[in-house]
Image (cartoon, rainbow, N blue to C red):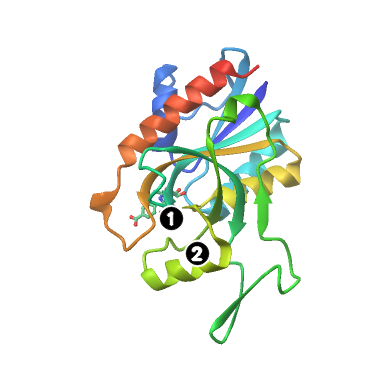
C-alpha cells in the first residue's frame, strides 16, 4: 500500500525512523515490508497539519493516511501510555460567543465541525475507539474543561486530529488516527506528563500495525 504517515513533531515519529536507520524526514517514500511510506511532519496545530497534508496530497495518491501522535485524555479510565483510535474528531472551538453561550459553526449553519476516520481494518479492532476534540488552546482550566465535556463529551484532545480528517476527506483518502495518552486534560502540571512512554508506545504500535497490514 502507498501510505502517508503524518505526525505533528519529529520527536513523535523519530523512534520508528531510527529503527529503520533513516536519519531526518525522508524526502522520498521509503519501502517498509509490503508498503511504500511517505512521512509528513507538519508542525503543531491544525493550520500546520491542514497545509502540510494539502501540499502532500497534490504530489501523490495514497491508499491510506495515518495520523500518529500523543494526546491528552479527559478520562482517568484511559491510562497514560495507552493507545486509542480517535474515530470522531471535532473542531470544538469553531463558532461564536453569544453572551454566556457558545454556538458551534454547525449551529450557525456555516460549516461542519464533526469529522471521522474512514479506514476500517481488523488489525485496529483491539484499540479503544474514542471521540476527540481538536483545539488551538489546550485546556488547563477546570471550568472550561467542564464546559467542553458538557458540550461534546470528548474522551481525548489533540491539536491536529480534526484537521487531519478534514484534509483526508477533502482528498478522498482513507484515514486512521491513532494516539497514545501522554497526559490528562487538567490544570496544567507538566510533572504529571509522560511523553517518552507515549512516544515509545505509539511507535511500537505503528511498527506492528504496518507489519500486519496487507
Ligand atoms: O506545555 C504544555 O502545556 C503542552 C500542552 C499540550 C501539548 C504540549 C506538547 O508539547 C505536545 C504537542 C503535541 O501533543 C499533542 N497533545 C498532547 N497532549 C495534549 C493535550 O492535553 N491537549 C492537546 N494536545 C495535546 C498535540 O496534538 C500536539 O501536537 C505541551
Point out the residue furthest to the front here: 77
* In the depicted structure, whether residue 14 falls above or below residue 179: above
Residues at marks 2 and 1 touching, judged by CB atoms closer than 8 Å: yes
Q: Where in the figure is residue 169, as x and y percent of width and height?
A: 72, 45
* In the depicted structure, whether residue 150 falls above or below residue 208: below
Q: CA distance from mark 2 to mark 1?
A: 8 Å
Point out the residue furthest to the bottom here: 99
Horizontal arrangement in the rendering, residue 36 relative to residue 111 (left or right): left
Relative to the observer, which residue lies in front, 198 or 42? 198
Q: Where in the figure is residue 82, as x and y percent of width and height?
A: 41, 38
The mark found on residue 149 in the picture is: 2
Relative to the observer, which residue lies in front, 82 or 43? 82
| Any part of residue 47 in sight | yes
Judged from the image, the secondary structure of the residue bearing numbered disc 2 is helix
Q: What residue sits 54% from the left and 56% below the top?
A: 133
Horizontal arrangement in the rendering, residue 200 relative to residue 206 (left or right): left
Q: Which residue is mark 1?
A: 74
Horizontal arrangement in the rendering, residue 115 relative to residue 17 (left or right): right
Q: Where in the figure is residue 173, as x and y percent of width and height?
A: 72, 37
Amino acid at each position: 500500500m502507498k501510505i502517508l504517515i503524518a505526525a505533528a513533531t519529529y520527536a513523535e515519529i523519530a523512534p520508528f525512523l531510527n529503527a529503520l536507520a533513516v536519519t531526518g524526514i525522508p524526502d522520498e517514500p521509503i519501502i517498509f515490508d509490503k508498503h511504500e511510506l511517505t512521512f509528513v511532519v507538519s508542525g503543531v496545530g491544525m493550520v500546520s497539519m491542514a497545509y502540510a497534508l494539502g501540499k502532500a496530497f497534490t504530489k501523490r495518491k495514497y491508499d491510506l493516511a495515518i495520523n500518529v501522535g500523543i494526546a491528552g485524555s479527559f478520562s482517568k479510565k484511559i491510562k497514560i501510555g495507552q493507545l486509542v483510535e480517535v474515530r470522531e474528531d471535532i473542531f470544538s472551538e469553531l463558532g461564536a460567543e453569544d453572551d454566556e453561550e457558545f454556538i458551534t459553526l454547525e449551529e450557525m449553519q456555516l460549516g461542519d465541525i464533526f469529522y471521522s476516520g474512514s479506514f476500517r481494518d481488523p488489525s485496529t479492532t483491539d484499540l479503544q475507539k474514542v471521540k476527540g476534540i481538536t483545539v488551538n488552546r489546550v485546556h488547563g482550566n477546570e471550568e472550561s474543561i467542564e464546559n467542553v465535556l458538557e458540550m461534546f463529551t470528548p474522551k481525548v484532545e489533540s491539536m491536529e486530529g480534526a484537521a487531519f480528517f478534514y484534509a483526508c476527506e477533502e482528498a478522498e483518502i482513507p484515514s486512521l488516527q491513532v494516539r497514545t495518552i501522554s497526559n490528562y486534560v487538567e490544570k496544567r502540571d507538566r510533572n504529571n506528563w509522560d511523553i517518552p512512554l507515549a512516544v515509545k508506545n505509539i511507535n511500537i504500535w505503528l511498527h506492528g500495525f504496518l507489519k500486519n497490514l496487507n
